[in-house]
Image (cartoon, helix red, strand yellow):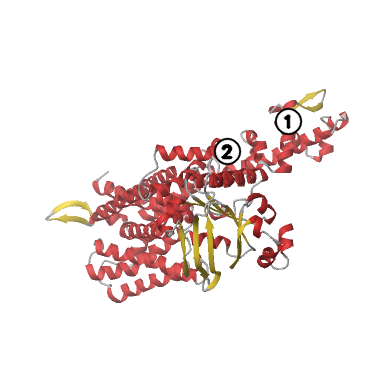
Amino acid sequence: MNNPQLEIQIIAAIVAIACAIPGVFLVLRKMSLISDAISHAILPGIVIGFFITQDLNSPILILLAAFMGVITVVLVEFIQKTNLVKEDTAIGLVFPILFSIGVILIAKNANDVHLDVDAVLLGELAFAPFDRLLIDGTDWGPKSLWVMGIILIITIVLLLLFYKELKVSTFDTGLASALGFSPIIMHYGLMSVSSITVVGAFDAVGAILVVALIIAPAATAYLLTEDLKKMIWLSILFGVASAILGYWVAHFLDASISGSIATTLGFIFLIVYLIAPSKGLIAVLYRQKQQRIEASLITFLLHLNRHEEVRERHINHLQEHINWGIVRSKTVLDLAEKNNLIQIDNNIVALTEKGLLFTEKSLEYIISNKDEKIEPMKEDFFLFRG
Amino acid sequence: MNEKVAIKIDDLTVAYNYKPVLWDIDLTIPESVLMAIVGPNGAGKSTLIKAILGIIKPIAGSVSIYGKPYQKNRKLVAYVPQKGSVDWDFPTTAFDVVLMGTYGKLGWIKRPGQNEKKIALEAMEKVGMLAFKNRQISQLSGGQQQRVFLARALAQDASIYFMDEPFQGVDATTEIAIINILKELRRAGKTVIVVHHDLQTVPEYFDWVTFLNVKKIATGPVKDIFNDDNLTKTYGINYKVAVNK
């Protein structure tokens, strides 16, 4: 591995971390689409900033463009507050217009400089190592590494300082406001950080990949954990893993690095969506199947409970009486026996003491809907886990 | 009755898009009462609480908590929003939510430490939720979620408690557990203000009541003012339907 290769991967990994952190909060606030809006709407800010500074990595340009990002959020909220359209429509109204203004500005004035729409949208990580920070003739490494490194450090410091405030204002705006943690300050703080991250990252990785790096890692982590801190760590992990894996995919396919990273992000989400332990598709389907069987089990136990007569409880009569297929009857019978809820003597089924208690409690729960009745049973049965 | 004033509201008007939802409210709430705010849907009950807490900006009027603006005395106040106002799929545990109650006294930047954790655990014990402290909040039943919210308010260790429909969607056991804790708070000299829907239970649960329907209809001790006259003024002629629903 040569030096530019390593540099590209480090830049990609740093961009991934810087995007993953605000991404977690955007996803939890159900605002992930605003990152899409910001990533496009900053274009006029970048163009105007570029006219002024003639340098895509200038801090002035980054601040100016990030300010455009915040303006985008303000405009979206303003349109939304009129109650004439919903949030998604407001987003869809604002960012294409701002983006188009940027496109026109480039076409009219910047034809001869290194700034075109393709570069803004798709970025080109492969070129990142060539734009180097030179001070008095000394090479300090790629400029974008410095830009994103500084943005990442600012993001981490803000996260550590305001973790508690971000958490409470994301979970419960009303409480945050009543406690004196202004949700408006937190909201615009998060929007500013997101905007600065997007602006800093667009030159290296492009507007589309930025959106993928903000949303996908957080969405993937959300499927796996029920703890905010773990969600942040997992998002960072997925972001960095996709960045490095995506780089090597691009390397072997000889394809766009940004495109490969975005595809990897999508692929990892798909895998996690399928196999996540409790929220994943396979787990959900399995749980639904178990719940169906357990519902049958309770029906069956209630039947046993109500019928003293032997002919109603003969193993061969169960099928015709409850009107189930052979497979279903067998599954239910096995499940009941496995849990010691029934005993079978001479092909006559009877409730055990445990089975009787279980049936009574279930019945009480079904009638009263009181959770405490079935609390100890949640461990063994999916049906009671809601 | 202790006549110290906990909350004083003068000429409060709140509007959404210039349509008034609360119109010129004057209200004085004495210390150490357990007060219900009752009124029909859209009467502005939740809005009144939110305006007192500064969550909604009024277009006119003022609110004082123990003689000072809310911003100066917010540590004296605890707030339980409607259960439906938050996302219960948020990745956090019951304990973490209760711990949020201690954030107000901590202020900006400082992290909760051992002392705050102890306060949160004690609050969970009071509402009978200690056994569920590590459970993810989406795995709690409606009644348990409401208890967690109450524990969070207890962790705020305030003098005045605001609760927005704490009995909505909870079972009878939880309702009794909650009202017992509220009565205990009042006995300890706290002021408790509850947005309440079930008119039948007002005389049993509360000692003070405010009738609200955009304007204030009446306020005072339940035994003096909870009568047909005020109910009719608040709910219109069909108030008996509201009582019997």
Which residue is located at x 68 percent, y 63 percent?
B231
Which chain's residue wears label 2? B
Q: Position of residue A309 (x, y in %)?
A: 88, 30
In the rendered structure, which amino acid carries the disc numbered 1? Leu
Q: Is residue B202 left or right of residue B101?
A: right
Frontmost residue, A247 versus A307: A307
- Residue A317 image point, x, y percent: 84, 33
Gap in angstroms between the C-alphas marked 1 and 2: 25 Å
Residue B226 in the image: state x and y as whole percent.
67, 59
Residue B128: which numbered mark, if any? 2
Relative depth, front residue between A5 and A213: A213
Residue at which label 1 appears: A357
Q: Residue at x 37, y 64 (%)?
A: A70
Q: Quadrant of the C terminus of chain A?
A: top right
- Observer-nearest of A137 and A307: A307
What's the amino acid at mark 2? Answer: Gly
Residue drawn at the location 65% of the way across and 60% of the way down: B225
Quadrant location of residue A256? bottom left
Residue B209 visible in the current orientation: yes
**Location of residue A145 with respect to A309 vertically, above or below:** below
Disc 1 packing (10 Å; few <14; some 14–19; many ≥20):
few
Tell me the element at label 2: loop
Assign a secondary structure to mark 1.
Answer: helix
